Each structure stands twice: as C-alpha cells, then as structure tokens.
Amino acid sequence: MYRDLKIIISMIIYFIYSLSIMGAVFFYSLMGTVAMDRLCIIITEATGFQRQERMLTTFLYPAMIQNLFWLSIAGIGFCLIFLFLLNQNFHSFWSPASLTVLLFLVLMSIRSLFFNLLPEDIDTLLSEPYIVNVLHRFLMSNIAVLIFGLILCCVAFFGDRFYNSIKDTSQVG
C-alpha cells in the first residue's frame, strides 16, 4: 500500500514538475517583450471562414508574467525537494533529469515548428522585433533547461556517493 501511494504521489509530482518547466520557459520568453502595459492573447477558431470567433481572450500584465515565472521556478524547486524527501536518495533525480532533457527536445521541436509557420517575409510584419525577441528568449531558456537537466543527471549520478563520503568522514572524527 505504501509503495503504491508513493508511486502515485511521484507521478503527480512529475506532472507538476513538467508543467513548471514548460511554464518557466514560456514565461521567461514573454518577459521583457511586452511593450504596452499588457499582452493580449486571443485564441480563435480556425475554420477557414473570414469571420473567426474568439474562444479565449486573456490579458497578461508584465508583473503577472514575472510572478508566474518565479512561481514556476519555485514549483521546480518544490518538486525536486519533495522527491528527495520522498525517496531519501539522490537517485530519485534520474526521472526529473530525463524528463527535463525530453522537455528540451519537445520544446525545441515546437520552436522549429513555430519557425516553419512564420511567413517568409517576416521583416514586413509590424510585430517582427517582438516575435524575434520572444523566440530568442525561448531558445535561451530552453538551453538553460538542457543545462539544468544535465546538472540533475550529475547530481543523480554522483550525489549519493558524495553524500555517503561526507557522512562517513563525519562519523569517523
């Protein structure tokens, strides 16, 4: 029973962790790109007709974007601390490390897909500097996710050895 509950809690934590990683990348790419006092996101129904219905409209203010970014970073830290306390070893970081590297690959494919959807003459768009800035920040934050995933791999591989060696030297003295 305890083992099953531990697996269910771990799955929930991994889901929250992946949402936090994607949120951190998304909100970091939006930080600093809002020229007005708010960013309006409109999701429309793509039916091919001239008239498109608004399905979702939201306003993201710069302070809200920064707060959501820091909330995502805090979510990442919370998930990693909770996983360590749940399993009591550093080997439990293998799953978040592999999940982080996989999210890097998924987000890079989304970025390349987005580049393919842009028109050929992007210089003629009025919002061109904002789009380029968002995509550049998306790339930088995605590279940071890859580096973080590799650091997690190193912590998962060397963490228990280092922790045990420190524990052994403190018990000898």
Image: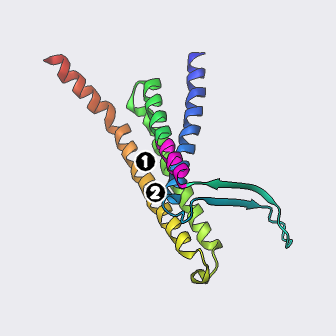
CA distance separating discs 1 and 2: 12 Å
Please say if 31 is above or below 85: below
Instruction: Write down the region rendered in magenta.
Output: 62-73
Q: Nearer the viewer, residue 159 or 38?
A: 38
Q: Residue 6's image quarter?
A: top right
What residue is at 19 percent from the left and 21 percent from the top?
170
Can residue 144 be seen?
A: yes
Q: Dot 2, crowdedness within 10 Å: few (<14), some or many (≥20)?
A: many
Q: Earlier in the sequence, mark 1 or mark 2?
A: 2
Q: Quadrant of the N terminus?
A: top right
Q: Which residue is mark 1?
A: 149
Q: Nearer the viewer, mark 1 or mark 2?
A: 2
Q: For numbered disc 1, what is the local secondary structure?
A: helix
Residue occupying the point 73% across, 59% down: 43
Q: Nearer the viewer, residue 120 or 8?
A: 120
Residue 64 painted magenta = yes
For badge 2, the amino acid type reads: Ser
**Residue 109, position in %: x, y?**
57, 62
Q: Which residue is mark 2?
A: 141
Nearer-the-camera pick, 89 or 128: 128
Residue 69, image x and y in percent?
50, 48
